């Protein structure tokens, strides 16, 4: 009886108003800019918060630059589509930075339907001595003006302002899951469940559709696009991943509509592991090119895989993130955790990869030494400046003192979003509504 | 959801279940998974569009289970499971899907919904009445209906998911028309066996639904029944 009443509540749209106090603060994306000086986070409430690394001072050599809040702005607002009677969430799905070309910073942020280009700029001087306005900005009576002066710029307290420069709307029928800036810095792509569109930054009322996998008859739909990214150096090349565990690499020079892939990456299924959940856990939740452009990394529910672009038949490396969940798939299907979309990241030199897990754990794999570590992002377990202690999940049998058993894991504490500084060993980890920044210890 | 005594969790690995046999049989597990999946597909009535990826994955899982059940010849349903009345709640919810499918195929009208129909939604249902329904249905066989109902689920999702712009106006009138048709059928007390009272008249046995609405019956039926239960 109670379960059914609960079901009705979930069906009922009012559930959205039962806000947990910090529901709107749940971080939904994290991204460093190209120099690592700035770190942007987007949250479920449509806000973007940008952190800036403080300059290292010569006096405090041992104190690495810390990240402080630089700018906060509301990027997206909730909308209501009256024609379809549907809400459009303001949650920021992805943020991507543009490379810096002048004093201002530019980033793309997107919710389910609309991409926006934001300009973040500093103002530390203001003009004083206008002729037609007084110091408070009130207009002067022209009759009282007897002399002319040239306004001068005087220093003021630093002000960081964010302004929306472009709004790219009305191009996606389904929910946008990825955006990716092209290496030509003139175009970018946005991908939803069934289509990928190519945009020019200057043009907001047109986009080119470059991938369309919507079947003529929706009843035949069995596969959706889950993530997409441009190659870091070749502006004609991009990849997209699917819910069936496949990756397609496309070349935009081949044709205007890239429905036929240039390369198709798929690992043959292991028949011994086959179950009703095989397809669901093979669904790729994130795909990332290495910085070199030679490899791609994919994340599915239980593993992270590294693929060589030159070999389509199988990945060159497979890392188990939390294989102890394999025997719990039914429970995870029941509570919907099996649909969680974890992201994955490379470090600056492509030698280490990182991804999140449950219980606020995140994992790092060293591709060279083949060693891996499990760390935890939580206030209770780490004081500021303390060294993170490796964690271990105990699979069966006797549990050692510091280990956690699989059944004690908290599945509501999931680390879906992480980021790695482009050149240094600084990582940002989003744990629900908390952001953790970890740095290599200084010797 | 599960009979008293069963832990309120899916079977997994080697969990010990109190008060019930040590491990449910494979076909019972499979049936339970199928029911769970169908319920998940139906829980799309929020104001925000359902997650298409999740829906596609669940639908594919349902198809896989159906295919295996067909191969096993397990499609003809066995006697109701002895595990208690819990799993039958699931069965009733799938029964609604099958009924909607039969309407479209123009088969014989489905039997009366028992007055325990609310059992699918909130109230517990006595075991015996349910088992009667199920056996009656099983004689019909579900062989053709599940794939149909799956497609209907997608039609429902499709009608919920945004259509191409040019089709928008065509679709906009649809759901309202269906709702009216169903409610009219109920109020008019048309020829459903047993009279047109309450939820039984929702069996659009007598009132032939417009063909376009059959596909949307799935979502609208649920919606309508919810409204009726809440009033």
Image: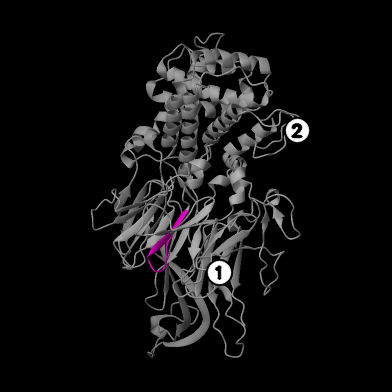
Vertical placement of residue A285 versus B217, above or below: below
Q: Residue at x 76, y 59 (%)?
A: A401
Which is nearer the eye, A173 or A63?
A63
Q: Quadrant of residue B168?
A: top left
Q: Residues within 10 Å of mark 1 (few under 14, many from 20)?
A: some
How far apart in space, not on screen, are marks 2 and 1 (Cα)?
45 Å
Mark 2 and mark 1 on one chain: no
Instruction: Name the residue beneath numbered marker 2.
Output: B18
Q: Residue at x 67, y 75 (%)?
A: A385
The residue furthest front is A272
Q: Secondary structure at mark 2?
A: loop
On screen, residue A226 versus residue A363, left or right, reads left
Q: Residues within 10 Å of mark 2 (few under 14, many from 20)?
A: few
Using the rendered image of the protein, determine whether residue B194 is visible from the camera's viewpoint.
yes
The chain containing the residue under callout 1 comes to A
Q: Is residue A431 magenta?
A: no
Q: Secondary structure at mark 1?
A: strand
Vertical placement of residue B29 versus A361, above or below: above
Using the rendered image of the protein, determine whether residue B47 is visible from the camera's viewpoint.
no
- Quarter of the figure that contains the C terminus of chain A: bottom right
Measuring from the top left, give residue B147's x and y in whole percent: 44, 26
The chain containing the residue under callout 2 comes to B
Span shown in magenta: A286-296
Measuring from the top left, give residue A122's x and y in whole percent: 47, 77
Q: Residue at x 40, y 41 (%)?
A: B162
On screen, residue A14 versus residue A1, left or right, reads left
Instruction: Name the residue beneath numbered marker 1.
Output: A427
């Amino acid at each position: 009886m109670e379960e059914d009443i609960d079901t009705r509540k979930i069906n009922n749209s009012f559930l959205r108003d039962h806000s947990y106090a910090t529901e709107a603060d749940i971080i939904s994306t994290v991204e460093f800019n190209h120099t690592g000086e700035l770190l942007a986070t987007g949250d479920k409430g449509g806000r973007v918060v940008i952190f800036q690394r403080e300059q290292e001072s010569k006096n405090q050599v041992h104190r690495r630059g810390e990240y402080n809040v630089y700018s906060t702005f509301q990027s997206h607002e909730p909308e209501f589509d009256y024609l379809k009677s549907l809400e459009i969430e303001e949650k920021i799905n992805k943020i991507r930075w543009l490379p810096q070309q002048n004093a201002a910073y530019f980033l793309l942020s997107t919710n389910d339907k609309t991409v926006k280009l934001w300009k973040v700029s500093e103002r530390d001087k203001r003009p004083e001595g206008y002729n037609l306005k007084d110091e408070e900005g009130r207009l002067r009576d022209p009759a009282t003006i007897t002399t002319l002066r040239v306004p001068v710029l005087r220093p003021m307290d630093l002000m960081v302002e964010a302004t929306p420069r472009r709004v790219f709307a009305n191009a996606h029928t389904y929910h946008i899951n990825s955006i990716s800036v092209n290496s030509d810095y003139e175009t970018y792509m946005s991908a939803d469940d069934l289509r990928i569109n190519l945009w020019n930054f200057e043009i907001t009322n047109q986009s080119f559709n470059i991938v369309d996998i919507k079947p003529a008859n929706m009843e035949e739909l069995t596969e959706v696009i889950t993530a997409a990214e441009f190659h870091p150096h070749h502006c004609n090349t991009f990849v997209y991943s699917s819910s069936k565990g496949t990756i397609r690499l496309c070349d935009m020079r081949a044709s205007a509509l890239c429905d036929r892939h240039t390369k198709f990456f798929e690992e043959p299924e292991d028949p011994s592991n086959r179950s009703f959940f095989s397809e669901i856990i093979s669904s790729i939740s994130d795909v990332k090119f290495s910085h070199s452009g030679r490899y791609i990394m994919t994340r599915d529910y239980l593993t992270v895989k590294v693929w060589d672009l030159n070999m389509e038949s199988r990945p060159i490396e497979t890392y188990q993130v939390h294989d102890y969940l394999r025997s719990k798939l039914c429970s995870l299907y029941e509570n919907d955790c099996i649909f969680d979309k974890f992201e994955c990241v490379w470090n600056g030199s492509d030698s280490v990869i990182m991804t999140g897990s449950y219980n606020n754990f995140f994992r790092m794999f060293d591709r060279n030494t083949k060693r891996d570590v499990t760390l935890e992002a939580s206030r209770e377990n780490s004081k500021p400046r303390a060294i993170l202690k490796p964690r271990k999940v105990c699979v069966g049998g006797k549990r050692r003192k510091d280990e956690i058993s699989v059944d004690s894991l908290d599945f509501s504490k999931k680390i879906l979003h992480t980021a790695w500084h482009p050149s240094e060993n600084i990582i940002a980890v989003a744990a629900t509504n908390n952001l953790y920044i970890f740095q290599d210890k200084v010797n | 959801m599960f009979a008293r005594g069963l832990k309120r969790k899916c079977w997994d690995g080697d969990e010990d279940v109190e008060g019930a046999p040590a491990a449910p049989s494979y076909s019972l597990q499979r049936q339970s998974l199928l029911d769970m999946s169908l319920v998940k597909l139906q829980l799309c009535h929020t104001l925000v569009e359902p997650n298409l990826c999740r829906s596609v994955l669940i639908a594919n899982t349902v198809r896989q289970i159906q295919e295996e059940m067909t191969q096993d010849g397990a499609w003809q349903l066995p006697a109701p499971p002895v595990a208690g009345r819990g799993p039958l709640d699931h069965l009733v919810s799938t029964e609604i899907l099958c009924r909607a499918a039969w309407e479209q195929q123009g088969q014989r009208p489905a039997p009366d919904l028992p007055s325990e129909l609310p059992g699918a939604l909130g109230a517990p249902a006595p075991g015996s009445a349910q088992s009667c329904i199920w056996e009656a249905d099983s004689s019909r066989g579900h062989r053709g209906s599940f794939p149909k109902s799956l497609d209907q689920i997608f039609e429902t999702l499709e009608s919920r998911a945004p259509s191409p712009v040019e089709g928008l106006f065509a679709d906009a009138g649809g759901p309202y028309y269906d709702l009216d048709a169903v409610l009219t059928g109920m109020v008019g007390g048309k020829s459903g066996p047993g009279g047109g009272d309450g939820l039984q008249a929702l069996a659009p046995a007598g009132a032939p639904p417009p063909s376009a609405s059959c596909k949307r019956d799935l979502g609208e039926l649920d919606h309508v029944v919810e409204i009726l239960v809440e009033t």
